Image (cartoon, rainbow, N blue to C red):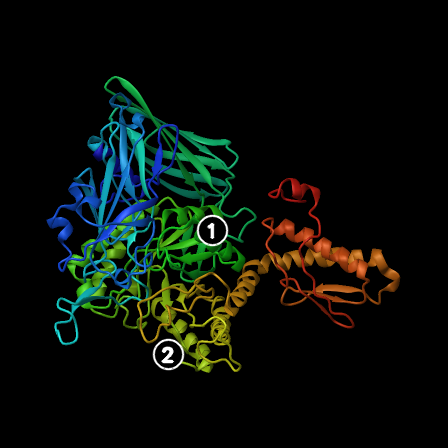
Amino acid sequence: MVLLALVVCLVLGWSPALALEGGMLYPRESPSRELKDLSGLWSFRADRSERRDAGFVQRWYEQPLRQSGPVIDMPVPASFNEITQDPNLRTYVGWVWYEKEVILPARWLQKEARTRVVLRIGSAHYYSIVWVNGVQVTEHEGGHLPFEVEIGSLLQPAQLCRITVAVNNTLTPHTLPPGTIQYFKDESMYPKGYFVQKTSFDFFNYAGIHRPVILYTTPSAYIDDITVTTDLAENVGLVQYLISVRGSSRYSLTLTLQDREGVVVATGNASAGGMKVLDPNLWWPYLMNEQPGYLYYLEVTLSAFVDGEVLEDKYTQPVGFRTVQVTSTQFLINGKPFYFHGVNKHEDADIRGKGLDWSLIMKDFNLLRWLGANAFRTSHYPYAEEIMELCDAYGIVVIDECPGVGMKDSINFGDKSLQHHLIVMEELIRRDKNHPSVVMWSVANEPASELAPAAYYFKTVIAHTKALDPTRPVTFISNANYARDQGAPYVDVICVNSYFSWYHDPGHLEVIQRQLTSQFENWYKTHQKPIIQSEYGADAIAGIHSDPPLMFTEEYQAAVLKEYHTIFDQKRKEYVIGELIWNFADFMTEQGTTRVLGNKKGIFTRQRQPKSAAFLLRERSWLNNVGRTRAKFNLVVASSISTQIRSHNATRLSNPLISVGSNHALKLSGEITEHLQDEMRLTLGYALEYVYPSGANLTGLFPFSACESLSASFSFSPKAAPPEQSQNPGTKKT
């Protein structure tokens, strides 16, 4: 079976993982699978001993945590740093201990049920060791990816299941991200044994159990992993799949691919194979199609023979038909040029730190759509699976980045770091390989890529990533000199960070366009690859204003963006394929003389309130994303309204004219009555609802300007939706 799986992987173009065993399917309930979410309050204690090892010496895991000393309540998921009023816990470095006692359903523990019970931790930062009822069951290195273990053999009916998790947030030169521990030995200035964690990245090193802890079940013979790739051949969608089964060598599989309405469009019955779908609905990014993020659902049913019994397992995997291709000047999705109009983000918020919060997630997605953003980068670590699922559903394109940030020293490019980096990429691809929203992998952010060891390091990491997934391009984000970057020859897309008139020539807006033009031309001339401006921006303290614009004001932030945008608009006609603002929202950092309660480069505050730059980017994103649709739309409306004007009030008009200008705007000259203005607003509203059935507010994107005597500005929200629109918001009007 192992040999067969290897052959199938090679046929599909996938390389089997070199260090990992088993899949990492996102937990979903089904007729054969149950979930128990352990989110809530856990018992918690930080190990305050000098060596941070009291928990291991005293074996806190052997008995309930409360019996070995005081505990406090700690929410999970959440960072522990800002939950209490203890300033020492906020900056604590070392081992912290979590514990939860749960009662499991009796049916899970019946031997005749042949049920696996799996403990899954979405992420815990940074190094974790897990015990169940005092027995160590697993450990994991890395703070942003899930890990799991089967625990059924340690459980007894009608007894509490005690789960203990020790988490250490210490970063070393070989972790991702890396860090160092600095000791201060002058006891006239520092307490004995005093130390601090030092890092080279600009965000707070929040720690704890950041994502849900879940118990879930499967039959003892189960679907372990699913790998799906898609392709297009004219009007035929192609699905290649690979199903991994564990627990039995005698089994059969039934696969059905269903569309959004539940209609079966293709079937299969093998562990590996292909399906064809005629005229499929493609997965399109937001604002590139009337139905962005269209998903099909691959339902896999396993029937396995175990000791004379037939066990059934069922799992459903979302699938999006889309292709990705990179040329020397373009990034193509489904064969059409795609421009990254987006943001960089952080998993960061008040109190909860990096803890998963559904309210915050939905607020952020609503703001992304309000902005007209079609993409973001998971700076600077993998985001929660729940976020990735929403990106699939909403059509938000993702550059999926590993935690390779802060790699500033040559020691970070040694063999030990390299081996860990390869494993992290395996874990990331294993988790996110089936997401259509993920169009590119990023293996690092702003590493010291001018150092000589970086050449072999990134050549190896990128080659390994491409071997694991040959269907997606690979990049890393650079702020190095274009001529000395040792890793740039190996990437598919050049991603460049620059902060002209901020970190370079601060306060001098007049140099941005010249410097940015030189940056683009030098990178492209040297590497002949498409370029994304992966970071740009300026800090702005909300509510601080200045005219003329001065640094840290909202006006200066907006002015910086405008200067960048001028060059983006020129160079996107050649080889620039995207712009990602730094940052979506203000976020917390370590304390320092250049940081006032964190990094203020967000276009939203940390509480998700807009600064002036947010409105600027909103207008820009909508204008660029809808420009082509807008031009076509206005040509049609121009003819329609001209006819409407003549028929309603021909005797009062003097040479009525409505036309489309060079910027696609509708131009109206002549006189119109107040009644006719209302009619025109309603007509335009209906048309916009047709083009954008989500009901986006596009006020100001289709402005009228009078050529002679009248200037009218319209708000294009319909006063009343047409009957068919009210009944079915997704219905396309003809």
Say which of marks 2 and 1 sits in front.
1
Quarter of the image where one finds residue 519 = bottom left
Quarter containing the C terminus: top right
Instruction: Decide if residue 340 is on the left or right side of residue 54.
Output: right
Quarter containing the N terminus: top left
Residue at 67% x, 57% y: name it. Answer: 716
Q: Which one is in front, 191 or 567?
A: 191
- Sooner in the amino-acid sequence: mark 2 or mark 1: 1
Residue 415 percent coordinates (x, y): 15, 58
Residue at 37% x, 61% y: name it. Answer: 493
Against 526, residue 236 (above or below) is above
Instruction: Decide if residue 478 is on the left or right side of residue 48.
Output: right
Quarter of the image where one finds residue 274 = top left
Crowd tier of the residue under label 2, counting other residues whose Cα lies within 10 Å: few below 14, some 14–19, many 20 or above: few
Against 280, residue 84 (above or below) is below
User: Does dot 1 land on a helix, a strand or a loop?
Assistant: helix
Quarter of the image where one finds residue 171 = bottom left
Q: Tag 2: residue type?
A: His
- Residue 227 visible somewhere in the drawing: yes
Residue 559 percent coordinates (x, y): 50, 75
Instruction: Decide if residue 176 is on the left or right side of residue 188.
Output: right
Q: Tag 1: residue type?
A: Met
Q: Which mark is residue 240?
A: none
| Residue at mark 1 | 362
Crowd tier of the residue under label 1, counting other residues whose Cα lies within 10 Å: few below 14, some 14–19, many 20 or above: few
User: Does dot 2 land on a helix, a strand or a loop?
Assistant: loop
Against 538, residue 281 (above or below) is above
Q: Which one is in front, 425 or 177?
A: 177
| Residue at mark 2 | 504
Residue at 53% x, 35% y: name it. Answer: 261
